[in-house]
Amino acid sequence: MKASQFFISTLKEAPADAEVVSHKLMMRAGMIKKLGAGIYTLMPMGLRVVQKVEAIVREEMNRAGAVELCMPVVQPAELWQETGRFDKMGPELLRIQDRHAHDFVIQPTSEEVVTDIARQEIRSYKQLPKNFYQIQTKFRDERRPRFGLMRGREFIMKDAYSFDRDQVSAKASYQIMAKAYRRIFDRFGLTYRAVAADSGAIGGDLSEEFQVIAATGEDAIVYCPGSNYAANMEKAEALAPAGPRPAASQAMAKTPTPGQSTCADVAELLGLPLAQTVKSLVLATDTLNEQGEVVKTQVWLLLLRGDHDMNEVKVGKLPGLGAFRFATVPEIEDHFGCKPGYLGPLNLLKPVKLVVDREVAVMNDWVCGANEVDFHLTGVNWGRDLPEPDMVADLRNVVAGDASPDGQGVLAIERGIEVGHVFYLGTKYSEAMKATFLDQNGKPQFMEMGCYGIGITRLPAAAIEQNHDERGIIWPDALAPFTVVLCPINAERSPEVKATAEALYAELLAAGVDVMLDDRGERPGAMFADWELIGVPHRVNIGDRALKEGNVEYQYRRDAAASAVPVADIVAQLL
Ligand code: ATP
Ligand code: MG
Ligand code: MG
Ligand code: MG
């Protein structure tokens, strides 16, 4: 590809709404363009990266015996009603109507459609196992679309679905996918960890997430450096022993900040025994009128970890303490506009991220937690948004230094970005949709299923979080939009430079290298800055001075400077 024919559009500054480095750099490198919240155009440079991801995923899925198809993005609601997900899924599922007022959904995944295909097409055990996959657009009306492609509303996912005759065979299909995922993520050249994840109501251990390790990751992952134990925080917490943590006894009393009350102050005022196992405390103040009737109720959810130091939790000034009392769960649900029962599963002993009505909040500078890095609750949402399950805070039951459940040492915690997920489904969907086949005895049986996702468009963002410097992106070769860029210097003035650049370009193209020739005639500084921002891993500068010695300059993206390489050797070195 020649730069003059391609489309390159780089920016000096990232837009203000870009918070994380991958979002900033993808915008600056001209890889994506925002159309709306969580909705982006893949610009030519970004599309090339996405296509690299797709090609590797496709190759490995095919190698693992999966077969590709392409299911509709717009799907009739009837199928989704069969499994109950049309109603159960909540606002993340985008529902639309056609001109006849028929309901449809935009696929967030495709279990229903693929199960419908299987129940029509697969009649006999002889047709099993089968694994269907697609690389297709998904839509999820995420509560907080953010970080560019990382959490989009429209995004591309590879989703695969396995169908088997029995559990043993289904688990084998699952393992084939788990193995294929390892090959895929190895090929991307990223540092990742496969972690046990919650398999929900289905039970068993057959759910793993593939997490790219990055400090900005939204997920906390727990692992034991001395063994193979690794789980996401949700799963690790489910396994952790209940009750107060041993560290609790070490809590030290501290003087409250002047002008602020601490939980302990409140507890004392209210005469409450504040057990150290309390994880959240719900208080309400009532404003009474002259007749003594309640005219306004204000509710606070105070979030405490089991072992936190009560004096460290600032609750701000609490006026009108005389009217304090505990609020009931229905009252809180009503106050925050949740459906009845919404907070039920949280049981209010589970830490939930704070949601406080603006009017209600008398608290400033919300920092809540155990006063340890990573355990503070910050960035509290002051809006009236509903608490959602994914708002479960970083207040955790499992912390670094806890004993590993496998007894092989202590736990460490790091952050990750979920780029893939493999999941054994059992007969959840096949039973709901009556997807059966005839077994060897001619008896109908429900198909055993598994589902397997990869965030195709999230992956480049995760790769950048892990691989960048102050100059820009550093793509692993496997993901780079171009693996090599040729930068002729002052080619207009030097026929030798131009000719050498063209010759190397032709030779690299013929050798199957993804090569870019920057023939825009830019000054060297601007040209280098562009390609360092875009993150092309290998750069060859072709200039008069080096050519006189029979050399070109080669610079790997992570190198501080270029080194001289004989023109005759450069192609071989790049292959
Ligand atoms: P998350 O926990 O990040 O919301 P998920 O568990 O809801 O992801 P899955 O249903 O497991 O996602 O989907 C499979 C894969 O699709 C995920 O592992 C992730 O890589 C990708 N993915 C999910 N949601 C998004 C999104 N909003 N934007 C980009 N990729 C996504
Ligand atoms: Mg999600
Ligand atoms: Mg997830
Ligand atoms: Mg997942």
Image: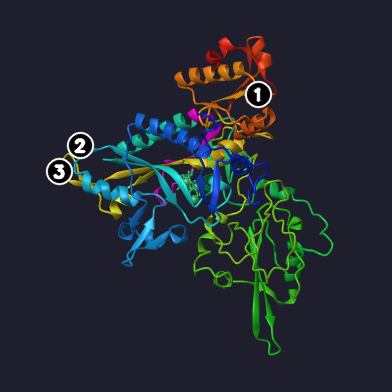
Q: Tell me the residue at 68%/34% (across/down).
A: 471
SS at circle 1: loop
Give the labeled residue for mark 2.
Answer: 126
Q: Which mark is residue 72?
A: none
Residue 202 magenta:
yes
Give the quarter of the image for residue 463: top right
Give how far across and how far down residue 518 sits, in percent. Answer: 58, 28
Instruction: Give the left or right position of residue 338, taking residue 129 as reference.
Output: right
**Viewer-proximal residue, 417 or 164?**
417
Q: State the separation of the CA atoms marked 2 and 3.
A: 11 Å
Q: Is residue 397 above or below residue 129?
A: below
The label nearer to you, 1 versus 3, is 1
Circle 2: residue type: Lys
**Viewer-proximal residue, 378 or 446?**
378
Mark with earlier residue (2, 3): 2
Residue 205 magenta:
yes
**Viewer-proximal residue, 85 or 368?**
85
Are dots 2 and 1 in contact, CB under 8 Å?
A: no
Q: Which mark is residue 442?
A: 3
Give the quarter of the image for residue 280: bottom right
Badge 1 crowding class, 10 Å Cα cut-off, few under 14, some 14 to 19, many 20 or more, is some
Circle 1: residue type: Asn
Q: Tell me the residue at 41%/43% (across/down).
A: 204
Give the labeled residue for mark 1.
Answer: 490
Residue range of the region highlighted in magenta in the rendering: 186-209
Q: Tell me the residue at 58%/26% (across/down).
A: 537
Give the quarter of the image for residue 474: top right
Circle 3: residue type: Gly
Tell me if residue 129 can be seen: yes
Q: State the separation of the CA atoms marked 2 and 1.
A: 66 Å
